[in-house]
């Protein structure tokens, strides 16, 4: 068997031994095996040669006058951790072996040895050097990729120690301090969203995989609003073969341009909505004058056509109102007026107010009263949320149906649920109903007027109150929309 499988690879070997016979013996055997061998007759010469160039393998005697093998091992480990050391020893005692291993020796070869014994030991060391080189290559490759990525990269181990990062990350997070290798995450950031996300990833169970994503703000970014940057972080775990979590990988993207684009679009939509709402409202009131007969008697046909026009224009006015609401909500204007609010009072008056509409469709609308603690919220927004949900329930429930509104305390939250016995929503449509302009179109709902903006508005308001909203539904059976809001 050849000592080196890859004949193109010529390992550099340094033999340090004060016994000429051993040095030259090693030289002869290894040079024949395609190795590049140098020799040193003392520890001092050996160290001097090691300082000059890199050796893949170092064969060193332990007992030499002056600098001995142990010192050589220690030096090699410090200066050239990628080198593999083999100890040549006349007396391989356990104590010596342990100490040599501790100093970084890879293997032993007891004197005297046969050429074959030497070949076996060196052959193992060659394989080890190849592995070390592969790892080193892999590391530089990874480092190069990571350094040139457009996104920020942050890798931590289980103790939240930073093990890999790139310059982009530091720039994005506004960090310009000391290098962060092996530093705790807290040295880089105290951003609660980011650290919380990494905590959740590191807390995953064996075999569990999750991608967490959130928006974060870079340090100091709030001071100058014109230069405000938006970042999105995504964290995932990395695991060993057994599925145990070894650490977290976080990628950070700068989404400022997307946000700006979105803001510009919203501003445009709101400008257009604002501009057309005025004239539309005028048209609507003029039509009402006609319908009411204030501009002269109308025939049945005319009244019928004007009624249809009026409903369509009414729908457009509603759309402009909702578009304006949405942009107002997106601009964060609703969270400013928070105060202690009794949700039950709001629900009670809403249910009372909507009773007439429900009765028109012969729907029973009821509120199950409960004692709820006040929550910190904007009253008008809360009215908007529940009036939207109850209106939907009435709109999407056929004649004779039932709508129930309930409220209860759930730990630190208040849960409000609106359940109906309506048309329901198909499973493939359900995840989309909170998207802007999304409307379920089928035989039953085709003629129901709407904009597809109600639920997005509801969701934005609820989230601006640190709450959540969830929809459950079964086609032909009914739907339940549940809103969860924090008590404090
Ligand atoms: P709109 O009601 O103006 O169409 P929404 O955003 O309020 O817009 O609702 C989006 C869609 O979700 C509706 O078009 C409807 O298909 C569906 N939906 C909402 N609420 C209900 C409900 N209670 N029952 C059945 N479908 C509903």
Image (tube, rainbow, N blue to C red):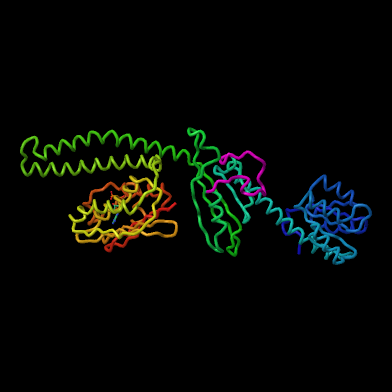
Check the picture and name the quadrant holding the N terminus. Answer: bottom right
Counting from the top left corner in percent of width and height, residue 313 is at: 20, 41
Magenta-tinted stretch: 171-192
Name the magenta segment's main secondary structure: loop
Which residue occupies 22% across, 36% down?
A: 280
Nearer-the-camera pick, 308 or 105: 308
Nearer-the-camera pick, 344 or 88: 344
Nearer-the-camera pick, 428 or 286: 286
Regarding residue 415, the answer to whether it shows in the image is yes
Counting from the top left corner in percent of width and height, residue 175 is at: 60, 40
Counting from the top left corner in percent of width and height, residue 384 is at: 31, 47
Nearer-the-camera pick, 374 or 252: 374
Which residue appears farthest toward the bottom when viewing the image?
Answer: 94
Horizontal side, residue 84 vs residue 472: left or right = right
Which residue occupies 65% across, 45% down?
A: 180
Regarding residue 425, the answer to whether it shows in the image is no
Q: Give the vertical position of 434 relative to 271 (above or below).
A: below
Q: Give the vertical position of 279 relative to 309 (above or below).
A: above
Horizontal side, residue 242 vs residue 130: left or right = left
Q: Number of marks in the image?
A: 0
Instruction: Look at the image and say whether residue 378 sits in the magenta stretch.
Output: no
Which residue occupies 86% across, 60% down?
A: 88
Q: Give the vertical position of 185 relative to 479 (above or below).
A: above
Counting from the top left corner in percent of width and height, residue 221 is at: 52, 37
Horizontal side, residue 209 vs residue 420: left or right = right
């Amino acid at each position: 068997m050849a000592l080196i499988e890859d004949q193109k690879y010529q390992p550099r070997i340094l033999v340090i031994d004060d016994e000429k016979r051993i040095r030259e013996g090693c030289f002869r055997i290894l040079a024949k095996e395609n190795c590049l061998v140098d020799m040193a007759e003392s520890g001092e010469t050996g160290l001097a040669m090691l300082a000059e160039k890199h050796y893949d393998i170092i064969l060193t005697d332990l007992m030499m006058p002056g600098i001995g093998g142990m010192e050589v091992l220690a030096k090699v480990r410090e200066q050239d951790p990628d080198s593999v050391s083999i100890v040549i020893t006349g007396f391989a005692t356990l104590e010596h072996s342990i100490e040599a291993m501790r100093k970084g020796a890879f293997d032993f070869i007891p004197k005297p040895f046969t050429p074959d014994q030497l070949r076996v030991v060196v052959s193992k060391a060659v394989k080890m050097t190849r592995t070390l080189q592969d790892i080193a290559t892999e590391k530089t490759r990874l480092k190069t990729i990571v350094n040139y990525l457009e996104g920020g990269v942050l890798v931590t181990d289980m103790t939240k120690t930073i093990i890999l990062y790139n310059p982009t990350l530091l720039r994005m997070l506004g960090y310009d301090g000391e290098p962060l290798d092996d530093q705790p995450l807290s040295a880089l950031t105290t951003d609660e969203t980011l650290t919380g996300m990494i905590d959740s990833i590191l807390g995953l169970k064996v075999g569990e995989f999750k991608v967490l994503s959130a928006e974060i703000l870079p340090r100091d970014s709030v001071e100058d609003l014109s230069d405000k940057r938006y970042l999105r972080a995504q964290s995932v775990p990395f695991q060993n073969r057994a599925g145990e979590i070894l650490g977290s990988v976080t990628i950070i993207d700068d989404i400022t341009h997307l946000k700006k684009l979105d803001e510009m679009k919203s501003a445009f939509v709101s400008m257009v909505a604002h501009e057309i709402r005025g004239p539309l409202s005028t048209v609507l009131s003029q039509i009402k004058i006609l319908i009411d007969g204030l501009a002269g008697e109308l025939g049945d046909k005319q009244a019928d056509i004007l009624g249809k026009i009026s409903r369509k224009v009414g729908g457009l006015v509603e759309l402009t109102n909702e578009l304006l609401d949405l942009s107002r909500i997106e601009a964060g204007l609703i969270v400013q007026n928070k105060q202690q609010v009794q949700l039950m009072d709001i629900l009670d008056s809403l249910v009372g107010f909507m009773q007439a509409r429900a009765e028109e469709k012969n729907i029973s609308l009821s509120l199950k009263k409960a004692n709820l603690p006040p929550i910190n919220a904007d009253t008008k927004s809360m009215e908007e949320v529940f009036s939207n949900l109850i209106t939907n329930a009435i709109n999407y429930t056929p004649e004779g149906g039932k709508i129930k509104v309930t409220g209860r305390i759930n730990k630190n939250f208040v849960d409000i649920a609106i359940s109906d016995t309506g048309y329901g929503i198909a499973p493939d449509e359900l995840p989309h109903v909170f998207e802007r302009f999304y409307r379920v179109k089928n035989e039953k709902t085709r003629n129901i007027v709407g904009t597809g903006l109600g639920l997005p508005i509801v969701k934005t308001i609820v989230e601006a109150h640190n709450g959540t909203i969830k929809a459950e539904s079964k086609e032909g059976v009914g739907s339940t929309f549940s809103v969860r809001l924090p008590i404090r």
